[in-house]
Amino acid sequence: MTRKKGLLFIALLAFAFILTHIQGAFAYFTDYDSRELSVTSGIFAKPYLMAGEDFNRTTSPVKSTVVDVDFVDYIPDLSAYVTGETKFDVSKEQDGTVMAWVDGTQMHIGGRGGIIADPSCNDMFSYYSNVADISFGGVLDTTETTSARRMFLSCTSLLNVDLNNIVTDGITNFQLMFGNCTTVKTLDISSWNMASAKNMYGMFLNCNHLTKVTMGTKDVRNNLTFENMFKDCSRLNSVDLSHFQTRDATDYDNMFSGCSYLRELDLSGFQMNENATLSQMFAYSGLKKVYASSNWSDVVKNDCVPFWYCAGLTGSTVSEAEGIDKANYETGYFTYKAFEG
């Protein structure tokens, strides 16, 4: 009898052990959003990067010395690095799944198998004043990101950033994303989907060495503000907006103000809102020709002065009094062009 009880007890223990592991396996497979299976290491947490503001604050000891940044899909042995000086845990859960480490002036940001960006990439590299090159290398997954406000603000040494490796489908806020990047000369965002955009305020504000922005086809009909978007991009001479569509925006103030090298704009895809304000939209620019597919003066009801001191436009009196009534191609400064979108 005693032997039978012992065998029954062992059997019950074995059953409990098996049941526990079955429950654990079930929990794992139903919790796939936060965990993954590694062939070499078993189960490990997905590499979620902390929010942009937190990343900026955490890496602040090196933000003024870093010159090159690259994202990688691995984490090496970092035992020789010093926490808070040359290595930083930049994972969302502070579990070491995403690490940043610095070799001299180069920063590496690594996560096993890739890195998942936070919904907020706000301020991630803002005021990294000496960074010249940022390479995402297809490693950073921004599918869940909704805001990139001030992401590269005042990166005053920035020359190269591989922007076409960033997914922008869900991003609504691009405010001051490249604001005051005073050394960058060209930017290519032709692959970006910006249909979710709501705020493009000052996106390239004061990028005063920027000569060319490659836009591609952009449906930005949901965007509400373009205020200061290219303001004081004084060397900008090439920006193709021929496939750029607007609709809901109510603020175009200073959009191209101070673009003194800009000679031509194709705004044929701009559908104006009657509540829009266009104050100094083209002020102090070097424009000689602006294409449009409709007469804005027939639509916009706000009293505004978009052509403030636009000396290059044919017929301009070079004064502050040139208002919305000149935003047409019959008696104003526009040239008609059908939209080719």
Image: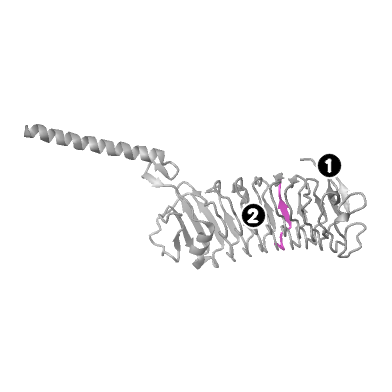
Residue found at x 88% / y 55%:
325
Label 1 crowd bin: few (<14), some (14–19), many (20+), radius 10 Å: few
For residue 83, above or below residue 75: below
Identified by mark 2, the residue type is Phe
| Secondary structure, magenta segment, majority class | loop
- Closer to us: 125 or 300: 300
Magenta extent:
207-216
Q: Position of residue 59 (x, y in %)?
A: 50, 63
Q: Position of residue 143 (x, y in %)?
A: 55, 46
Residue found at x 80% / y 49%:
267
Image quarter of residue 42: top left
- Residue 213 falls within the magenta-colored stretch: yes
In three-dimensional space, the C-alpha distance between marks 2 and 1, rounded to whole angstroms, equals 29 Å
- Closer to us: 175 or 206: 175
Q: Position of residue 160 (x, y in %)?
A: 63, 56
Identified by mark 1, the residue type is Ala
Is residue 311 toward the left or the right of residue 141 in the image?
Answer: right
Residue found at x 57% / y 57%:
122
Residue found at x 71% / y 53%:
213
Q: Which residue is mark 1?
A: 338
Q: Position of residue 271 (x, y in %)?
A: 78, 46
Image quarter of residue 276: bottom right
Circle 1 SS class: loop
Q: Earlier in the sequence, mark 2 or mark 1?
A: 2
Label 2 crowd bin: few (<14), some (14–19), many (20+), radius 10 Å: many
- Residue 313 falls within the magenta-colored stretch: no
Is residue 3 toward the left or the right of residue 120 in the image?
Answer: left
Q: Which residue is mark 2?
A: 174
